[in-house]
Image: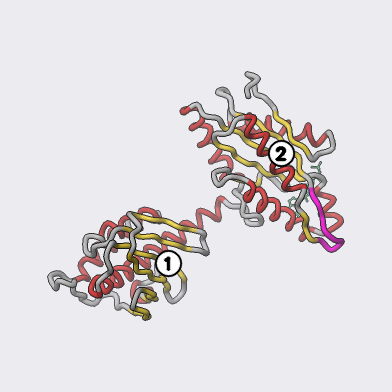
């Protein structure tokens, strides 16, 4: 729900030579530095534009577009550490002014504006006024993003959920088919996980699941995505990766997990995983690709676990 502008206009300012908390009334007639046009008109136009989107990138681009017509600056960087976001528009230059965007209810992150020369005092005044107009649309976009994230994320581990996995896999399959690049998946299952739950308790089981995802994410490249497929089963999506690459990554993950120690009541726990890999062929469907990796994983399970295997497709593909 959008907060009325008047209660969302606190901008905490930390900038060169200026450090203050400014409260900007919503409807005042601010004057532009040149005194020609009421700034409130510009704010109104800016707000109207910003309200056309809930997409964070679009909102920041619109803000940059409108505000840089009034104040000479080159680019901006928006950072929200809580949501692990860093977005930029335009260029980063030597001089900057930074603002922490805080409303009465929320910390909306920090924005840094860049320019080749020092910002003048009138420019900073205008920027601060325009920033107060950004607050509501920015908060709405962050809430929208948080809702989207929540609907595609596994609450326990932070990995993508099954819904996200199917959507991403479909998308990647289409790309791989169109551009003829490789695509592999890994299906990962924790060995004898039920025993961990039974002997150490569900809370320790949960810790193992979280640690697993943390480790898989750390070992993988940024572009490889991790999903929770089922209870103790995970899928890693490896874009532009062939059979050999997939098996190298699988072994790297297996070794990393085998070296992991999780604290439990009875001491330190070690865990092992079984991994199945498959690589996309032209005739593949999402389900077919996953099914082969799953079969390969079960072959390892049947041999006692703690290993990795590859299952070729119809064409005996790599
Ligand atoms: N702690 C915890 N346990 C879960 C969660 N989801 C599923 N499980 C448990 O995961 C266990 C899976 O057991 P099985 O399917 O028998 O698998 P396993 O013991 O790993 O046996 P293998 O796969 O053959 O090595 C069950 O005990 C489930 O209750 C969860 O979110 N948290």
Is residue 88 on the magenta stretch?
A: no
Q: Residue at x 63, y 30 (%)?
A: 289
Disc 2: residue Cβ within 8 A of ligand 1's nearest atom: no
Using residue 201 as the reference point, say whether residue 72 is left or right of it.
left
List x then y, in percent, for residue 120: 24, 72
Disc 1: residue Cβ within 8 A of ligand 1's nearest atom: no
Name the image colouring: secondary structure
Q: Residue at x 61, y 48 (%)?
A: 161
Using residue 222 as the reference point, say whether residue 261 is left or right of it.
right
The quarter of the picture where residue 276 lies is: top right
The quarter of the picture where residue 247 lies is: top right
Q: Give the SS element for disc 1.
A: strand
Using residue 105 as the reference point, say whether residue 286 is left or right of it.
right
Q: Main secondary structure of the magenta part?
A: strand
List x then y, in percent, for residue 31: 18, 74
Q: Is residue 56 above or below residue 235?
A: below
Q: Is residue 18 above or below residue 253?
A: below
The quarter of the picture where residue 235 lies is: top right
Residue underneath mark 2: 251
List x then y, in percent, for residue 272: 78, 45
Residue underneath mark 1: 110
Check the picture and name the quadrant holding the N terminus. bottom left
Specify start and end residues of the magenta stretch as a single range.
264-271
Closer to the camera, 180 or 290? 180
Of labels 1 and 2, the one closer to you: 2
Q: Residue furthest left?
A: 36
List x then y, in percent, for residue 246: 64, 34
Q: Residue furthest top?
A: 315
Q: Give the SS element for disc 2.
A: helix
Q: Residue at x 79, y 61 (%)?
A: 263
């Amino acid at each position: 729900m959008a907060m009325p502008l008047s209660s969302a206009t606190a901008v905490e300012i930390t900038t060169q030579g200026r450090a203050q908390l400014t409260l900007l009334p919503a409807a005042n007639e601010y004057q532009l530095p040149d005194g020609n046009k009421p700034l409130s008109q510009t704010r109104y136009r800016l707000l109207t534009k910003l309200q056309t989107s809930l997409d964070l990138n679009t909102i920041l681009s619109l803000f940059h577009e409108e505000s840089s017509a009034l104040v000479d600056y080159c680019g901006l960087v928006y950072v929200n550490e809580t949501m692990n976001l860093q977005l930029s528009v335009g260029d980063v230059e030597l001089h900057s002014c930074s603002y922490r965007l805080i409303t009465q209810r929320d910390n909306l992150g920090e924005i840094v504006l860049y320019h080749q020369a020092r910002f003048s005092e009138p420019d900073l005044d205008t920027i601060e006024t325009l920033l107060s107009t950004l607050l509501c649309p920015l908060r709405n976009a962050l809430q929208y993003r948080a809702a989207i994230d929540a609907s595609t994320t596994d609450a326990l581990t932070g990995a993508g959920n099954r819904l996200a996995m199917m959507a991403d896999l479909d998308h990647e399959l289409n790309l791989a088919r169109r551009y003829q690049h490789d695509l592999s998946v890994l299906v990962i299952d924790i060995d004898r996980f039920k025993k961990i739950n039974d002997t150490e308790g569900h809370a320790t089981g949960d810790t193992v699941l979280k640690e697993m995802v943390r480790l898989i994410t750390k070992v993988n490249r940024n572009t490889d995505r991790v999903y929770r497929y089922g209870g103790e089963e995970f899928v890693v999506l490896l874009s532009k990766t062939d059979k050999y690459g997939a098996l190298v990554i699988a072994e790297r993950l297996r070794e990393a997990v085998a070296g992991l120690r999780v604290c439990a009541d009875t001491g330190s726990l070690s865990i092992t995983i079984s991994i199945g890999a498959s690589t996309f062929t032209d005739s593949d469907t999402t389900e077919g690709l996953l099914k082969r990796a799953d079969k390969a994983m079960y072959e390892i399970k049947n041999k006692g676990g703690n290993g990795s295997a590859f299952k070729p497709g119809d064409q005996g593909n790599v």
